[in-house]
Amino acid sequence: MDNYGSIGLNNRLQANTSPIANYSRIPGYDFENQYEMKGRKLIASKLNVSSIVWNSQTGEATGDFTISSTLIVTSYLGNNNPKQNEPILGIPYLTIYEGTSDLGTNQIYPITSTAVGLTKYHCQFDHDLKRNDGVLSSYAGLVTNTVGTASTTIYARVRWMYLDFVSQDGGALHA
């Protein structure tokens, strides 16, 4: 049943009168022999991934649960002046610790250390790659102390990996 000509269709079930059914296909290996490319100018670029993928400086902050049982952690990445309105795309690497330093046994987020206790803190984070205006990447969330221990200090550390389409020197700024 490969012949559909009696009902006006080709073997690909396309109408015999359609433009797509009536053009001649040229295999890729034969393209250079049948067509000659002409133009007034040629624009070419070489993409070097190491020139557009950058790491930001490390940002650090501390906070404590003296007034509330919840801390808000927010980090933004955007371009420096005068390119602050240019788009940027960044992915954060955020770690949060109990205490005032980045001691691995006190890690809370992204992986909770067994020394801290798996149910002592609850973390919720959300990543907005380009926000509404497309010129900032943001990462924000809540750290909740579920046992209500007063005056516990939290240490947060973030570093961004981002694509820099604007400058040649990785000109984004961690804010």
Image (tube, rainbow, N blue to C red):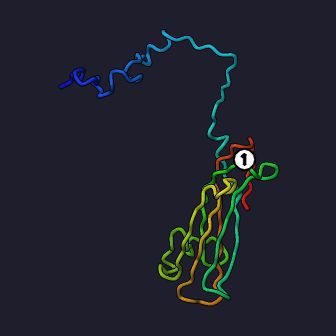
Which quadrant of the figure contains the C terminus? bottom right
Q: Residue, x 68% and y 78% (percent of image)?
A: 63
| Picture layout, residue 41 above or below residue 123 | above
Query: Which of 140 and 95 lies nearest the eye of the viewer?
Result: 140
Q: Residue at x 70, y 71 (%)?
A: 61
Q: Provide residue 166's location: percent of width, then percent of height.
A: 73, 43
Residue found at the very far right of the displayed protein = 82
Q: Is residue 88 left or right of residue 124?
A: right
Give the image location of residue 38, x and y in percent. Answer: 62, 13
Q: Residue at x 70, y 53 (%)?
A: 135
Q: Residue at (67%, 40%) from the top-left corner?
A: 51
The vertical placement of 53 against 66, above or below, is above
| Image quarter of the N terminus | top left
The one nearer the camera, 59 or 47, is 47
Name the image quarter holding residue 6: top left
Q: Label 1: how many residues lie within 10 Å, few (<14), some (14-19) or many (20+)?
A: some
Please, what is the three-letter code of the amino acid marked with disc 1?
Answer: Gly
Q: Position of residue 103 (x, y in %)?
A: 60, 72
Residue at numbered disc 1: 170
Left or right: 4 as drawn, with respect to 52: left
Q: Position of residue 118 (x, y in %)?
A: 47, 79
Q: Is residue 147 above or below residue 56?
A: below
- Label 1, secondary structure: give it: loop
User: How many labels sit on residues?
Assistant: 1
Residue 144 occupies quadrant: bottom right
